[in-house]
């Protein structure tokens, strides 16, 4: 099928971004959020997207993940044209290939830690969901907190549940949007170490949006945005 998002074994690029633009129409005229952004991210790399507030970082992440569609240009996910898929197709692509870690955790309050981590496996239709969810929660040091609800967990523990949920599906690509933004310095550093440790062990491509230059420096590459344009790609 032409719009399949199946992995392409011959490509070494996790993401290929060409001429990417995003514009919105406002009462006072057109607002350019992103303009002509181009880059490639190789499979297995860790990449930080940095820039001042309003530079277009979060919009870029949404486009890369297929949560939004561009006004111009294209995004290819492991060689397949993500930008050309319909909403259902992009959702399938995310389910098969992509994991997310958000600043505000986005755990479901009515589910326990174990149930939150089992959920993406259940949505994917996996037969075995409890054992892998327990294993990854053990891996992030929460083996004794399986039955706790988010309100019973500290911020650092909630972010570890979110990391476990992101990695339990063994994604080829992980997006993290300000993953330490709501954590104190010590807890944030512990989460960073865990994030890179899990990333290295799983061989997952990691794309971070961050204001933290120290965190960005840990990545293989840094993409810097300014007023919607890519001004540096180290």
Image (tube, rainbow, N blue to C red):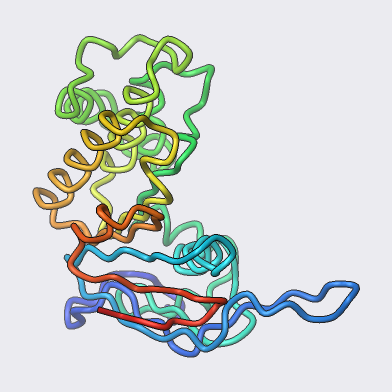
Q: Is residue 155 left or right of residue 30?
A: left
Relative image position of residue 136 (x, y in whole percent): 20, 30
Work out whether 88 lies above or below 222.
above
Residue found at x 56% / y 65%:
59
The quarter of the displayed image where residue 39 is located: bottom left
> Against 110, is 213 above or below?
below
Q: Nearer the viewer, residue 25 or 74?
A: 25
Residue 157 is situated, as x and y percent measured from the top left of the image, at 32, 22
Residue 76 x %, y %: 39, 79
Q: Is residue 156 left or right of residue 225?
A: left
98 lies above or below 82: above
Judge by depth and name the residue closer to the eye, 91 or 69.
Answer: 69
Q: Quadrant of residue 183?
A: top left
Q: Quadrant of residue 206?
A: bottom left
Look at the image and tell me in which quarter the N terminus lies.
bottom left
Q: Position of residue 143 (x, y in %)?
A: 20, 16
Q: Residue furthest right?
A: 27
């Amino acid at each position: 099928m032409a719009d399949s998002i199946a992995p392409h074994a011959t490509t070494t690029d996790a993401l290929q971004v060409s001429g990417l633009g995003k514009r919105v129409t406002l009462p006072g005229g057109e607002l350019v959020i992103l303009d002509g952004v181009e880059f490639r991210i190789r499979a297995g790399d860790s990449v930080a997207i940095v820039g001042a507030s309003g530079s277009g970082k979060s919009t870029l992440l949404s486009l890369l993940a297929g949560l939004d569609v561009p006004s111009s240009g294209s995004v290819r996910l492991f060689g397949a044209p993500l930008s050309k898929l319909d909403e259902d197709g992009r959702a399938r692509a995310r389910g098969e290939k992509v994991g997310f870690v958000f600043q505000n955790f986005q755990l479901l309050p009515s589910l326990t830690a174990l149930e939150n981590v089992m959920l993406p496996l259940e949505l994917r239709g996996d037969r075995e969901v409890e054992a892998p969810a327990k294993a990854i929660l053990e891996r992030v040091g929460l083996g004794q907190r399986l039955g706790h609800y988010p309100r019973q967990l500290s911020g650092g523990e909630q972010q570890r549940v979110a990391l476990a949920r992101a990695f339990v599906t063994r994604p080829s690509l992980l997006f993290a949007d300000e993953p330490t933004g709501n954590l104190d310095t010590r807890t944030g550093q512990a989460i960073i170490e865990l994030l890179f440790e899990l990333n290295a062990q799983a061989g997952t491509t990691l794309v971070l949006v961050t204001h933290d230059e120290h965190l960005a420096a840990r990545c293989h590459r840094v993409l810097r945005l300014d007023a919607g344009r890519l001004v540096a790609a180290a």
